[in-house]
Amino acid sequence: MLAKYETNETQGQVVQTQDVLLQRAVQRIYNNSPFYRTKLDKAGISPGEIRTVEDLDSVPLTDKEELRLEYPLGLMAVPEEDVVRIHSSSGTTGKPIIVPYTKRDVQIWAEMMARSLELAGVKGRDRVQVTPGYGLWTAGTGFQAGVEHLGAMAIPTGPGNTEKQLEMMTDLGTTVLIGTSSYGLLLAEEIKKHNLNDELRLKIGIFGSERWGDKMRRRIEDILGIETFDIYGLTEIYGPGIAIDCAVHKGLHYWSDHLLFEIVDLDTGRQLPPGVEGELVITTLTKEGMPLLRYRTHDITRIHLEACSCGCPYPRIDRILGRTDDMFKVKGVNIYPGQIDHVLSLTKEIGSEYQIILTRVEGKDSLLIKVEGLAGAEDGRLALKCQRNIKTRIGILANVEVVLYGSLPRSEKKSKRVFDLRDQGL
């Protein structure tokens, strides 16, 4: 496995090897990035003081707001003539983050994406339908580059136009589908609706850009008869393809020769040991155009350094539980959507789609969860069953409403699941 990208690292050598890469990266970042040179100088830290992963604990974290304040190219760490491409975040919550890439950055990203595809079982003779968006967004371009680097056939349909997607899928014999999990579910349901399963050659689905749970995974796999893989990434750190789960499906392998992952405490920002849940922080070890030092992803997970039975030598993180900014508090309890998702997955008679609706009635928080019942389900019994599971496992009393299957909205992009109406007086 990953024969083309073998590493000499064993799991026990990951940290030691990364210490060497880290020392080189910090010195390079300090020399080339005015932003980080100023940041480290203000903290009274010289590059030579950062020699191990543990030494990073004293280095200030970098947050998205700092990147926005440097708009458009304040974090560029190479001469402009070395930049061959830019990508950008959506900017829906403020100024977008512009990310410059050098030729080497583009090559490394394509290599990491190819590793990801290979780990998911994609081979040179596969036909890969790429449904994420192209343009300033990283997803479509990143996936296509990885497919081409691997030597497979890219079918760059981009997002939307579901009828055309299905036509390409059947006529070209697509074997690998890439997209958001929400769009994967939408396409699966359309395929089932139009009885197209016998006309398909699909065998693999690779989905990312949003958190999705085991219930949705099983639903997509059952309808399409494929194996699915969870891929991870973010615009500020190349894009998608920096981690993916393997055939064992017990965590996502990340490319530790290019990226250093830490887990920090949500409240203190201090490092946490492997196996302890917290916020993922990433340092780029080889990125040139816009290197990042201890970048807060706001994603909740944990690191596993022990060997994976799949044989891949790279370390793993858990599938993302949620985001720190997605967390909501009800009656003094901190809750992530992923926790609700996990508890709902315990009930076989409901589908994968759900909505969390928060309101405030007479000064008291109220939590309503809408779920879809599968055919023949008894609404009252199911609602009570879900309610009891949530109370037992999360510790809160929620109202549960079981609605008809397919009545909750589907999306060609990411699904919105949490609707907090408390500030609206509802």
Image (tube, helix red, strand yellow):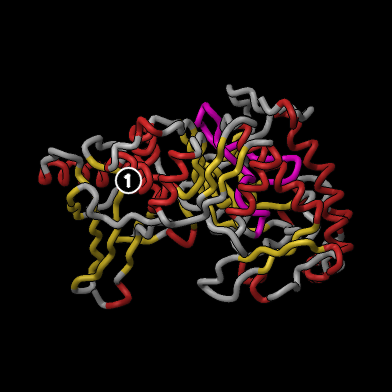
Instruction: Give the left or right position of residue 15, taking residue 339 as reference.
Output: right
Figure disc tally: 1
Q: Residue at x 32, y 75 (%)?
A: 423
Circle 1: element type: helix
Q: Residue at x 58, y 29 (%)?
A: 121
From the image, which quarter does the N terminus lie in?
A: top right
Counting from the top left corner in percent of width and height, residue 377 is at: 14, 39
Which of these two is toward me, 112 or 296? Answer: 112
Q: Residue at x 67, y 68 (%)?
A: 98
Counting from the top left corner in percent of width and height, residue 60 is at: 71, 62
Is residue 276 something that shows in the picture? no
Q: Is residue 13 above or below residue 342?
A: above
Q: Residue at x 64, y 51 (%)?
A: 142
Instruction: Give the left or right position of residue 115, taking residue 323 as reference.
Output: right
Instruction: Give the left or right position of residue 244, taking residue 52 as reference.
Output: left
Which of these two is toward me, 214 or 405? Answer: 405
Q: Which residues are magenta?
A: 236-260
Instruction: Give the left or right position of residue 82, taking residue 363 as reference.
Output: right
* Residue 237, quarter of picture: bottom right
Q: Is residue 254 part of the magenta span, yes or no?
A: yes
Q: Is residue 29 above or below residue 387?
A: below
Residue for badge 1: 190
Residue type at mark 1 is Glu
Which of these two is toward me, 336 or 109? Answer: 109
Q: Residues within 10 Å of mark 1 (few under 14, many from 20)?
A: some
Is residue 65 something that shows in the picture? yes
From the image, which quarter does the C terminus lie in?
A: bottom left
